[in-house]
Image: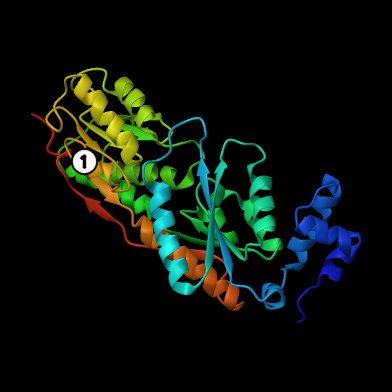
Amino acid sequence: MNRPTIDDVAGLAGVGRTTVSRVLNNQPNVREEVRDKVMQAVETLGYRVNLQARNLAGRRALRIGLVHASDFDSEPNSYFASALELGATRTATEQGVQLITHVINQNDPGAADDILARVRDDQFDGVILTPPFSDNVALLRRLRAQGVEVVCIAGGADAEAAALTVGIDERQAGFDIGQHLIGLGHRRFGYIKGLAGHISAEGRFDGFLAALTDAGIAADAVRWTRGNFTFRSGLDCAQGLLDGRGAVTALVCANDDMAAGALLAAHKAGLQIPGDVAITGFDDTPVSEIVWPPLTTIHQPLRRMGGRAVELLVARVTNPDAPNSGREIIAHALVIRDSSAAEPA
């Protein structure tokens, strides 16, 4: 069966091929209803831009984008983005690939259009998306329709069906933390979740609850609140959860930055760690080793994830038969340090 052409898309959508080109290149002055018709035709036909032809015509090296999501109104995560970028940069250098990084405001309603415009302007062959952009299925499909291959960092099940994803088993990691704390005798828990809609972080919480269920502990043994992955939110959230001695004996945080904030809240409240309350983080960032006491956490191999994302993109761009969707799991590890110990008698 012959691959669909741009003329096939134009015919099905009832527009000219120039209009199709304008939509695929995210150019302005196209009515939304027309743009929707073109994208529906693209999906129906499974149309993809011929990347190999474009690269041969340009005679240039492959160019990959790494898109970080950031909340411009709060401090950045201390390590997540830089570790991914370091791994991606090293691998891109080894493979002779150009890597360009963009930081996009995740709270901007026009963020997806901004990403598409930057991809077009920089002529990316492939792009690596971080959460929450890695779970924006509509964005994934628009990128693929433009002939841009995508790898998602820590994408959820919907992203996995639309693109390649790289990450750890978030649910199992949350289960491991829960099992560790239960094994130490803890039965009264606090949990500081991440941003709403952050699917990978939600998976951690689901796994934690599954560990409690397996141990016969009811879900109401957990008091939870929601932070935004920053130190400040960890401090503020922990102050609400640690509102009385013995109310919570183990406090689980969805990342290390929030756990560091929780440690400060516990210190300010005069609580002994881990004597009065155990605290755990997630990611195994450098901060987890320099706070006091050092944090029990989950080692997430962020540099390896960034490097592997580049490898998968290069494989896909240079070989159309390489997989273009699915999930690759990279092993995580529970790192036990001084911030967790047996529940006080």
- Specify the quadrant that holds the N terminus: bottom right
The residue under the point 77% across, 67% down is 45
Where is residue 178? Give x, y as percent.
26, 43
Q: Is residue 242 visible?
A: yes
Pinpoint residue 185: horizontal percent, then vertical percent. Answer: 15, 38
Whether residue 218 is visible here, answered yes or no, is: no
Q: Where, by quadrant of the figure, is residue 88 drawn? A: bottom left
Along the viewing direction, whichever of 195 and 61 lies nearer the viewer: 61
Residue at figure coordinates x 85%, y 47% from the top left:
29
Q: How was the colour assigned to the protein in this rendering?
A: rainbow
Which quadrant holds residue 337? top left
Query: Closer to the camera, 220 or 32?
Result: 32
Q: Residue furthest left?
A: 345
Callout count: 1
In the shown orientation, is residue 138 left or right of residue 284?
right
Which residue is more in the foreground, 123 or 68? Answer: 123
Decide: is 241 above or below 42: above
Lateral position of residue 289 relative to residue 7, left or right: left
10 Å neighbourhood of mark 1: few (<14), some, or many (≥20)?
few
Q: Residue 217 location in percent, x, y?
A: 26, 37
- Where does residue 140 sit, x and y in percent of width and height? 62, 56
Q: In this view of the protein, which residue sits in the foreground, 2 or 228?
A: 228
Give the side of residue 189 with respect to residue 27, left or right.
left
Which residue in the structure is indicated by mark 1? 290
At label 1, the amino acid type is: Ile
Query: Is label 1 in a helix, a strand or a loop?
Result: helix
User: Which quarter of the image is occupied by the C terminus?
Assistant: top left
Looking at the image, is 39 positioned above or below residue 269? Answer: below
Q: Residue at x 16, y 20 (%)?
A: 270
